[in-house]
Image (cartoon, rainbow, N blue to C red):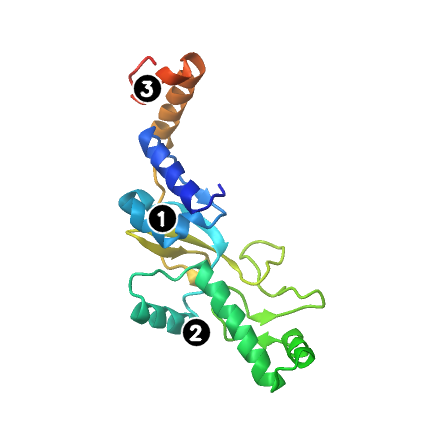
Amino acid sequence: MVSRLNDAMLLTRELVKQRWTPMAVLSMGPGWYEDQYLKTLGKLADGPLSFVPWYDPNKKLSKQLEAALAKAYPDINLNTNHIYTFEALLIAADAYKRAGSTDPKALADAIRATDITDNVSIGPGIQFDAKGQNDNAEERGHPEPRRQAGHGRAQGRGQRQGRVADDGLRQARLKLLAPDPAPAAAAAGALLGRIVRCPRKSISTSPSAAC
């Protein structure tokens, strides 16, 4: 499911309104992990999984970034938006330091020669190929290269984002929204049945209602 912030909130509220609890909400968009979504919906925001570029919590620089953000802005969760910004600045600062100049050509050459191994995103570091892509950053378990940052899995719980991943990156266990799929499937089937047979304006969200 792909959606922005407002769409994610609307979809979640509609799921609650329809009394439908799917086994999981899998998101490839930014809306579900953003602070406003988590804080606005409270407990209703718990559970959706975001498959997005994320940070590796075991990296030294990630821990430093998390600590710095928590100290300066304790109510803000570290997420993809911060990672993109931080690593863009990291690349620029590293290139400037190596170029020793603000000359555009010197900076461009320095950026092309980027070789940063101490970063925050998932993957071995930041290096660019001839096409300007960071091919070393790959999604775990996926053979195709990913741009700029490795993809991670984050699950909202208690207005925070818990990192869910493979191997040594595992911070938390995946928690399904509805462990038993039968009630969710039955509710969804009943709702779809009412939508098919009832006039649109007369559809009731009550599981026992005829229309």
What is the quadrant of residue 185 in the picture?
Answer: top left
Residue 55 seen? no
Mark 2 is on which residue type? Answer: Leu
Describe the element under mark 1 as helix, strand or loop: helix
Whole-percent x and y of residue 183?
33, 28
Q: Earlier in the sequence, mark 2 or mark 1?
A: 1
Q: Is the C terminus in the top left, top right, bottom left or bottom right quadrant?
A: top left
Placement of 159 over or under 56, stated as above or below: above
The amino acid pointed to by label 3 is Ser
Which of the marked residues, 3 or 1, is nearer the chain's N terminus?
Answer: 1
Which image quarter: residue 79? Answer: bottom left
Question: Disc 3 vs disc 1: Cβ atoms closer than 8 Å?
Answer: no
CA gap, disc 3 and disc 1 = 27 Å
Secondary element at image label 2: helix
Q: Which residue is mark 2?
A: 61
Where 18 sits versus 161, above or below? above
**What residue do we see at 28% from left, 47% from top?**
42
Looking at the rendered image, the disc whose residue lies closer to the viewer, 2 or 3, is: 3
The residue that label 1 is drawn on is 37
